[in-house]
Amino acid sequence: GGRHGEQYVAMNTRGLLEMGGPYLTPDGGGMMIPASGISEEEIRRIAEADPAVRRGLLEVEVRPWYIAMKTA
């Protein structure tokens, strides 16, 4: 919530975010999938600027993902 949520709403508005949200498991965490064409460097910069990350409430892990199948 708060500034963390505001940052990702702004990312979505700017066309930088494909999807994101929390996991529905008790251990928490979540995932954000950036829009295609954004460099890994830019993804890291955006994620590390998240207010919740800067306060130590969330950790960032950038992992490459190969999309093997996508529906129209």
Image (spheres, grey):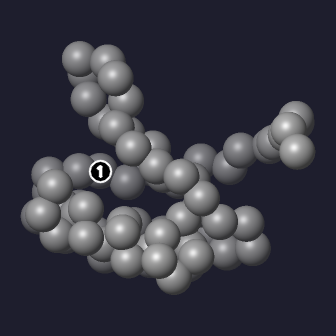
For the point 16% across and 55% down, which residue is it?
Answer: 1
**Tag 1, which secondary structure?**
loop
Please name the residue that numbered disc 1 is placed on.
59
| Of the pair 18 and 58, the residue shown nearer to us | 18
Q: Is residue 62 above or below residue 45?
A: above
Image side of residue 5 versus residue 17, left or right: left
Image side of residue 41 versus residue 58, left or right: right
For the point 25% across and 70% down, which residue is it?
Answer: 6
Image side of residue 49 versus residue 32, left or right: left
| Of the pair 17 and 52, the residue shown nearer to us | 17
Mark 1 crowd level (few <14, some 14–19, many ≥20, 10 Å Cα): few
For the point 38% across and 77% down, which residue is it?
Answer: 10
- As drawn, the residue found furthest toward the top would be 26
Q: Amino acid at mark 1?
A: Glu
Residue 44 percent location from the top left of the image: 48, 69
Q: Is residue 66 visible?
A: yes
Q: Is residue 48 visible?
A: no
For the point 37% across and 54% down, which residue is it?
Answer: 60
Quarter holding residue 37: bottom right
Residue 54 percent location from the top left of the image: 19, 68
- As drawn, the residue found furthest toward the bottom would be 14
Residue 26 percent location from the top left of the image: 23, 17
